[in-house]
């Protein structure tokens, strides 16, 4: 039996941060990786958000020398695929003026492959004093008097200590601790993706500062595309309750698009790998801890409720878990009741802020880009009618506006119920009922917004001056 203060199962981003924070606080720490090195058994690449640079100071040390695939991107392209399976338009977005800090004003994601990023991150944990054990599969939990006391590996070696489950969507720690046997089908998505390689010069010349693309479609669930220094991947997913056909059927629809095939030709892209993984996606995490056990990241159901990004939540919940562990070990109390402190700590973070409106965010996303036949079949043509219809010269502009209005009117029987069912609850959760009431009372709205009242008053004065 080897004795530790903290045992971390998993050496992904969440596991490495947990191990690093634990070791830095003077706790005897070990973390396990089933692969030969961290990142070996992951799902391709990732997009790292600027919040990681804001909240984890060591991220400024990440360089292309550490991660050759590293590629920042300031732009995101949104492709709109209509009911005929054709790209009917696309929109480009970049950071806006309301963004408050760097590097978020300069780029939206920093993309790299996990096989490079994970080992780099794990080194911070080992440098802090944590012991990393690779090529080791943790197969079960040790129990004393019915309560978890540590872990056991595939060779029968035993380790005692407080257990941090950072072992992903199919979490052994969650299962063996009794927190859950598996995710319910409406709580988890299946995500297949292709990875392509292409010359870095082609990526730079063709894609410029594009970091990623989203393919919004009326015929398949929303697909995502992420560009790295030497390649890209394309994938899509949906909740397990949705699929009418094999997931590959829908992913192949994306790849078969003429626009996508054209992109492959221009980039000289070649298929490199196929991957598939499960991803928890729910409106609210629950059952995050038990006696002597804390779940973080995917194991705890923490991917963002809107777009299911999981690395940042894993790192933040890891930090909250170790803060909790320090207090629990100091108090010699690792009971589930004491570890309730963990929920209070992660809810006080930006991840907790995200989940304040988690059910509403997850619901609207599930009902919009992940309901291609039910919702996107009218949403895509309506959006393109509103945006794209204005920019043509087929008729006098006033005539075009009337044509667009008549066309959009046809979509209102679908749009209005959607707004009432999904948009209004989300806005209410974000703004609060008291502020939602302002939207139906112009006088109260103006009174609550001095800037608006001042602008209106100034416009009247300027008009009077022009008339004089």
Image (cartoon, rainbow, N blue to C red):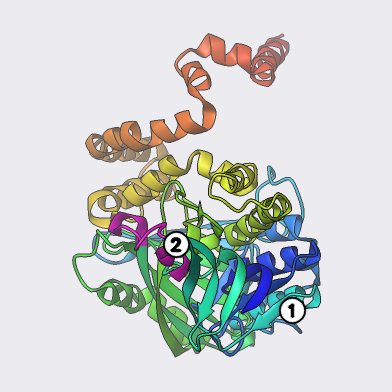
- Looking at this rendering, what residue extends furthest in the front direction? 145
Q: Residue at x 75, y 65 (%)?
A: 27
SS for callout 1: helix
Q: Is residue 146 left or right of residue 102?
A: left
User: Range of the magenta residues?
Assistant: 172-188
Q: Quadrant of the N terminus?
A: bottom right
For the question of whether residue 450 can be seen, the reply is yes
Q: Position of residue 351 (x, y in %)?
A: 59, 49
The numbered mark at residue 463 is none
- In this rendering, which labeled residue sits more in front, label 1 or label 2? 2
Query: With respect to residue 197, does 336 lie above or below?
Result: above
Q: Position of residue 249 (x, y in %)?
A: 25, 75
Q: Is residue 225 left or right of residue 407?
A: right
Q: Quadrant of the C terminus?
A: top right
Query: With respect to residue 373, does 403 lie above or below?
Result: above
SS for callout 2: loop
The answer for how far apart the CA atoms under marks 1 and 2 are is 29 Å
Q: Residue at x 51, y 13 (%)?
A: 442
Circle 2 residue: 177
Circle 1 residue: 123
């Amino acid at each position: 039996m080897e004795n530790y203060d903290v045992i971390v199962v998993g050496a992904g981003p969440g596991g490495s941060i947990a191990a690093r924070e634990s070791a830095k606080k003077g706790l005897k720490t070990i973390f396990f990786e089933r692969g030969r090195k961290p990142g070996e058994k992951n799902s391709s690449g990732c997009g790292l958000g600027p919040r990681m640079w804001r909240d984890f100071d060591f991220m400024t040390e990440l360089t292309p020398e550490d991660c050759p695939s590293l590629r920042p991107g300031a732009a995101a392209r949104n492709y709109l695929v209509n009911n005929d399976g054709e790209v009917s338009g696309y929109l480009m977005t970049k950071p806006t003026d309301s963004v408050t800090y760097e590097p978020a004003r300069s780029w939206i994601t920093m993309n790299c492959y996990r096989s490079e990023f994970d080992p780099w991150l794990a080194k911070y944990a080992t440098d802090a004093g944590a012991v990393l054990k690779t090529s080791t599969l943790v197969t079960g939990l040790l129990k004393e008097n019915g309560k978890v006391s540590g872990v056991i590996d595939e060779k029968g070696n035993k380790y005692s200590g407080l257990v941090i489950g950072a072992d992903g969507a199919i979490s052994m720690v969650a299962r063996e601790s009794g927190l859950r046997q598996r995710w319910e089908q409406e709580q988890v998505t299946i995500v297949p993706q292709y990875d392509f390689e292409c010359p870095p010069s082609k990526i730079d010349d063709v894609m410029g500062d594009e970091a990623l693309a989203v393919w919004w479609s009326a015929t398949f669930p929303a697909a995502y595309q992420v560009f790295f220094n030497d390649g890209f991947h394309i994938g899509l997913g949906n909740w397990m309750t949705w699929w009418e056909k094999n997931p590959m059927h829908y992913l192949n629809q994306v790849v078969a698009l003429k626009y996508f095939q054209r992109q492959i030709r221009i980039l000289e892209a070649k298929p490199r790998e196929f991957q598939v993984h499960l991803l928890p996606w729910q409106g609210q995490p629950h059952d995050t801890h038990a006696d002597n056990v804390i779940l973080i990241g995917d194991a705890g159901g923490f991917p963002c409720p809107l777009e299911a990004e999981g690395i940042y939540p894993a790192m933040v919940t890891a930090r909250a878990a170790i803060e909790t562990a320090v207090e629990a070990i100091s108090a010699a109390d690792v009971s589930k009741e004491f570890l309730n402190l963990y929920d209070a700590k992660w809810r006080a973070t930006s991840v907790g802020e995200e989940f304040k409106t988690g059910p509403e965010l997850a619901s609207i996303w599930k009902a919009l880009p992940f309901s291609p036949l039910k919702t996107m079949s009218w949403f895509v043509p309506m959006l393109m009618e509103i945006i794209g219809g204005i920019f043509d010269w087929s008729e006098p502009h006033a005539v075009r506006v009337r044509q667009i209005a008549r066309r959009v009117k046809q979509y209102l029987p679908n749009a209005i119920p959607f707004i009432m069912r999904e948009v209004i609850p989300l806005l209410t959760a974000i703004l609060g009922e008291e502020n939602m009431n302002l939207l139906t009372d112009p006088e109260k709205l103006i009174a609550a917004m001095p800037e608006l009242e001042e602008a209106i008053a100034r416009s009247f004065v300027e008009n009077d001056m022009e008339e004089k």
